[in-house]
Amino acid sequence: MPIILNLDVMLAKRKMRSNELAEKIGITTANLSILKTGKAKAVRFSTLEAICEVLVCQPGDILEYVNEKQ
């Protein structure tokens, strides 16, 4: 998938654990794990907004596009 979520990087920078983030944004740790591993087919803007609010970051800090054709 050409869109990568760098949640692990931001969690490490903020010294926060996945289960803490999941609790603060109101999703299960299982759903957060699906996001982190790139297995999610979509992300709601409300979830993305909550992640950015809690991690004090911009969407571009956690979303990355990688061209797989190169």
Image (cartoon, rainbow, N blue to C red):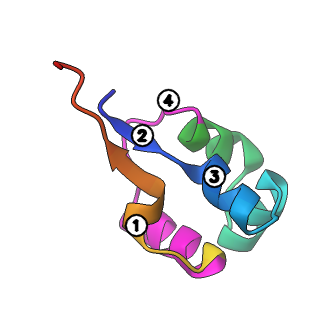
Q: CA distance from mark 3 to mark 4?
A: 17 Å
Kind of residue at disc 1: Pro
Q: Is residue 65 left or right of residue 61?
A: left
Q: Which residues are magenta?
A: 37-54
The residue labelled by disc 1 is 59
Q: Which quarter of the picture shows residue 14?
A: bottom right
Q: CA distance from mark 4 to mark 2?
A: 10 Å
Q: CA distance from mark 4 to mark 1?
A: 18 Å
Q: CA distance from mark 1 to mark 2?
A: 12 Å
Q: Which quarter of the picture shows residue 19?
A: bottom right
Kind of residue at disc 2: Ile
Question: x and y percent of residue 47 in the render?
Answer: 50, 65
* On screen, residue 63 above or below 58: above
Kind of residue at disc 3: Val
Question: Can you tell which of label 4 and label 1 is closer to the viewer?
Answer: 1
The residue labelled by disc 4 is 39
In what element is the residue under mark 3?
Answer: helix
Q: Is residue 51 left or right of residue 68?
A: right
Question: Which mark sits nearer the N-terminus, 1 or 2?
Answer: 2
The residue labelled by disc 2 is 4
- Badge 3 local density, few (<14 within 10 Å), some, or many (20+)? few
In what element is the residue under mark 4?
Answer: loop
Q: CA distance from mark 2 to mark 3?
A: 12 Å
In what element is the residue under mark 1?
Answer: helix
Kind of residue at disc 4: Lys
Question: Which mark sits nearer the N-terminus, 4 or 2?
Answer: 2
